[in-house]
Amino acid sequence: MDELKRRILSEAVVGEGDMIRVDMFLNHCMDMDLMERMGGALAKRFRGTRITKVLTAESSGIALACFTAKALGVPVLYAKKFQTGYIDPDVYSAEAHSFSLDKSYTLRVSKRYLNREDSVLLVDDILSNGQTMLSLLELVSKAGGEAAGVGIAIEKAMREGGNVLRRMGIRVEALATVERIEGDRILLA
């Protein structure tokens, strides 16, 4: 997606290690028009694929998942990181480790909203090591559903997440792929 690539090259900031800060338009202060176009672009890539739900993890992927689900005409579901009184206590759960936070947490989805009839598109803002996606896949598997694929705004190709998922036979579609980082320069594929 050319618009996203332009925004990455002109606005993104390289942080410590290979951290890419896109919080100015993607995952903190969001450009909703861009987000809607990105959701439409992901939906277009998966048209013709049976998808009954879009699933993401709390919280950076929620907006993109919502616009993708809206474009596909299906519900969106997000895995919560905390058990609250607002979620049914009967949940599927999976442990996840966040690359960006260097922190582990438990993802939870109510059994009421995910089941064996579901064909689920997993969506997130950034794919790095793939730990969140593997945890979301585990939730879908526990529900007896199937993964229709993974849709990502930005894939970091210098990390193994995308390759791990592809070796598992999972279709991965990224709107922009970061090939590598050289100093403070982001090089896209």
Image (cartoon, grey):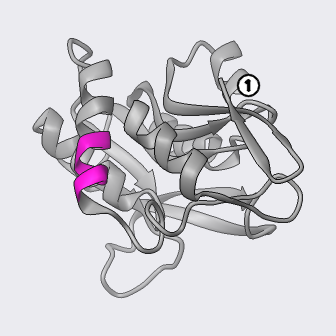
| Residue at left offset 68%, top offset 57% | 96
- Report the residue that reaches farthest toward the front: 10
Image coords of residue 42 (percent x, y): 33, 31
- Which residue appears farthest toward the left when viewing the image? 73
- Viewer-proximal residue among 181 and 118: 181
Q: Position of residue 43 (x, y in %)?
A: 25, 30
Question: 175 or 167, which is in the foreground?
Answer: 175
Q: Quadrant of residue 129?
A: top right
Residue displayed at 46% across by 68% down:
80
Q: Is residue 55 left or right of residue 101?
A: left
Residue 48, compared with residue 100, is above or below; it is above
Q: Is residue 120 covered in magenta?
A: no
* Dot 1 amino acid type: Val
Q: Is residue 87 left or right of residue 28?
A: left
Q: Residue at x 59, y 12 (%)?
A: 169
Q: Secondary structure at mark 1?
A: helix
Q: Which residues are magenta?
A: 33-38
Q: Is residue 162 left or right of residue 39?
A: right
Q: Residues within 10 Å of mark 1 (few under 14, many from 20)?
A: some
Which percent across, then down, holds residue 160? 79, 31
Q: Based on the displayed image, in which of its 4 quarters is residue 53 positioned? A: top left
Residue at the spot of label 1: 164
Give the answer, above or below, for where 55 lies relative to 11.
above
Q: Can you say whether 103 is above or below 3 in the image?
A: below
From this viewpoint, is residue 118 visible?
no
Q: Is residue 133 above or below residue 92?
A: above
Secondary structure that dominates the magenta span: helix
**Quadrant in the picture for residue 72:** top left
Q: Residue at x 38, y 39 (%)?
A: 3
